[in-house]
Image (cartoon, rainbow, N blue to C red):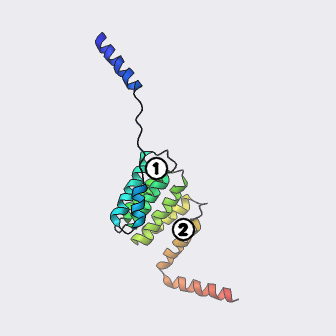
Amino acid sequence: MRILSIISLLGILWACDSEPRVLEKIDLTPAKLAYDANPEDTTLAKAYSVQLEKAAKQDLADSLAPYHLLKSAFILRSIPGYSLESINKFKEVGKRFPEHSVAAEASFQIAFTWDEFIGNKAEAMKSYEDFILNNPTHPLRQTAEEMVFLLKLADNPQDLIERLRQTNTESKE
């Protein structure tokens, strides 16, 4: 019993004496330079996006982590066929950093991706409306409201024509 206690004590002392493990910070420079040199190369874009995501997840307390994850989503969206994956990444930004300003930006980008990259107007409308509801003072709110207006008019282009005529008549007066 004494031997077991001594071995346990030595193990505890040894564990406390060892230096803490320091994670090596991910160097984004090579992936960024490669991507910047040829942003149309989907392999380089995907590799850079993965590196950004790793950097963001490595240290969530790092002030750049939210920006790395947001940029990862933007890069994914630029890759053909990765729009849905980018939406998931934008959602992850909001979940991991809900109080950071990038969360609102990510929310807007979800709607924009549904609208402009995927073409799902119903999801875009819902996402823009969620953004407007949850971010009443955000600078992109007016843009989101205009996008909702345009999406509603897309169902009835005659309304748009009539509204433009009315605006044109008012401006002549």
x, y (%) of residue 95?
46, 51
Q: Which residue is mark 2?
A: 144
What type is the residue that disc 2 sits on? Answer: Ala
The secondary element bearing badge 1 is classed as helix
Residue at position x 67%, y 86% in the image: 171
Farthest top residue in view? 2
Q: Quadrant of residue 17?
A: top left
Q: Which residue is mark 1?
A: 96
Give the label, 2 or 1, closer to the camera: 1
Sequence order check, earlier mark of 2 and 1: 1
The secondary element bearing badge 2 is classed as helix
Foreground of the two, 125 or 5: 5
The reply to whether the C-beta atoms of the residues labelled 2 and 1 are less than 8 Å apart is no
Q: Residues within 10 Å of mark 1 (few under 14, many from 20)?
A: some
Q: Quadrant of residue 22?
A: top left
Residue at position x 42%, y 61% in the image: 33
Q: Quadrant of the C terminus?
A: bottom right
x, y (%) of residue 8?
33, 18
Up the image or down, 93 lies above or below 60; here it is: below
